[in-house]
Amino acid sequence: MRAAWFWVMRSRLVQALARGNGWQELATAQELVRGLPPSEVHADVLAQVANWSMVHVPGPEAFTAAERAVEYARMVGAREIEMSARLTLGSLIVHSGDLEAGLKEMYEVAGATTENGMTAIAARVYVNLPDALEAVGRSAEAVPILEEGVAHTRKFGLLDSEAWVWGNLAESLFSLGRWDEAATAAGKSERVGQSAIPRGFHATLRAELALARGDLAECADQLAAARSHFGTHDRAPQHELPLARIAIGVTAAEGRLLDARTTLRRALDEGFPPDTQRYAWPLLLTAAVAEADALGLPATETGRAEVLQDIRKAAKTLATNVPVWHAYEHWVRAELRRAEGHSDPDDWAAVTAAFETLDRPYDLARVRHRLAESLLSVGGEDERDRATELLRLAHAVAEHLGARPLADAVARLAQRARLGLSHAPKRAPVPADQAEALGLTGRERDVLRLVSAGRTNRQIAEELFISPKTASVHVSNILAKLGVSGRGEAAAVAHRLGLFPAERLSSRTAG
């Protein structure tokens, strides 16, 4: 038993130092306990195998390993090991498509570990539960849990866990359009992380933000740093697929589409393991966008049809079990058609409608740009008016986020179509008090000011001396009056209209 415990510890160390993926060590430990009566060490080995499988080879075998770990831990009364295995099992259930059952399991573990002082397992909860929420597009639900996780891991000096929490927070903030806060969180992840893997995760996040903001040199630097931290021995899909996606994006942006295709081909040849749709859909989208943007360039025509066919084939294998990935499926299809020279407003209207129900302002701005482009290709006064409003919304968000490539693309399209981005078509002069013209009450104006500063409903309630429920109602009314679908877009509209010129509209930094 002592030897098995040693090999489990060695597996953790090897992974932390990025000197291997840790499987050989876990396999040795598993062989040492095979056939022995249940014990705490046996249960721990099974729990570690389940967690490793969840990260590296998600699917039925990981699920079985997690169930066995829970069973053995209960048999020997190893409560903390049971909680850890249940957390892994809950995450696997979420990724398999049974969201509510999986999240229920994870929330139960969260309550039990907190109540019973299981400090280390609670830290895992603060990493894995928000990660599961982010994986299904529930970023806003993940953020407050991650903020609690920062306090917990700091309190107990769990530096690597804190680094993971900051990294996950950066990821969710990026999705929500709170990019300045995301950059700060990623920086804190880098400063506190001791192990190689969290540092690689941080560099990946910084590369993604740099790419979205058009800083290709910084993106390439961070991409190289991420690869260095991860090493060559641990090719977990949760690291490899985002790196491949970013590599495709940066090489395409530099005009090296053939290199982008090589990266895509390598990823497709390795395949997408089960339950990795959160990484695979964005990768396929990035590749499809690259092909569509290069349409008409003679040097890229050879092989285009095969690439598009391969993307379609890969897309058929991916799950669309939650709204965010269903929206991505529509988006990938529309980009593939654009890459073939077809841009149907009905296709892009469906994509836009799908994203309007999600709180992902950058994605929504991108598809609004494409919808406007397709409307302008049709012509007609109504289409021009609609395209103008779409471009104004997309440009406001892009400027607010600092998404320079998107802002420039929107501006170029507006210039070609001779459309103004400053004023809506056929609209009366804007009143001096624009908040009043938008139909906002005095209280709603106060709430919008705080939303624009990145405050949560709970923080708004505390500052305005109202209940969180009342704050939520005000936010919902504001979104309806502004005609936007999320808080990030509301902040962008406030910024564009200059509603609070004397105040800085950057979000408050967590921590």
Image: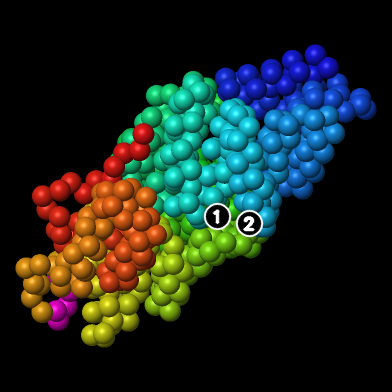
- Quadrant housing the N terminus: top right
Q: In the rendering, at what x and y percent does residue 141 appear? A: 48, 51
Of the pair 254 and 69, the residue shown nearer to us: 69
Mark 1 and mark 2: Cα distance apart in space: 8 Å
Locate residue 90, reporting x and y percent.
Answer: 67, 46
State which tag comes first along the sequence, 1 or 2: 2
Q: Position of residue 507 (x, y in %)?
A: 28, 45
- Would you call the spot at circle 1 few (<14 residues within 10 Å), some (14-19), or many (20 or more)? many
Q: Is residue 193 magenta?
A: no
Q: Which residues are magenta?
A: 423-427
Residue occupying image coordinates x 14% and y 79% = 427
- What is the number of the mark on residue 456? none
Looking at the image, do the residues carrying marks 1 and 2 touch, with CB atoms under 8 Å apart?
yes
Most common secondary structure along the magenta stretch: loop
> Which residue is painted at 50% across and 55% down in the image?
137
Give the residue type that dot 2 points to.
Answer: Leu
Give left or right: position of 77 versus 96: right
Q: What's the residue at 63%, 32% (across, down)? A: 116
**460 to the left or right of 129:** left
When asked about the image quadrant of residue 151, the answer is top left
State which quarter of the image contains the C terminus. top left
Considering depth in this image, is 389 or 255 the residue closer to the camera? 389
Label of residue 136 in the image: 1
Q: Nearer the viewer, mark 1 or mark 2?
A: 2
Q: Secondary structure at mark 2?
A: helix
Tell me where residue 366 appears, x and y as whole percent.
36, 61
Mark 1 secondary-structure assignment: loop
Residue at 23% x, 85% y is: 381
Q: Is residue 350 visible?
A: yes
**Which mark identifies residue 99?**
2
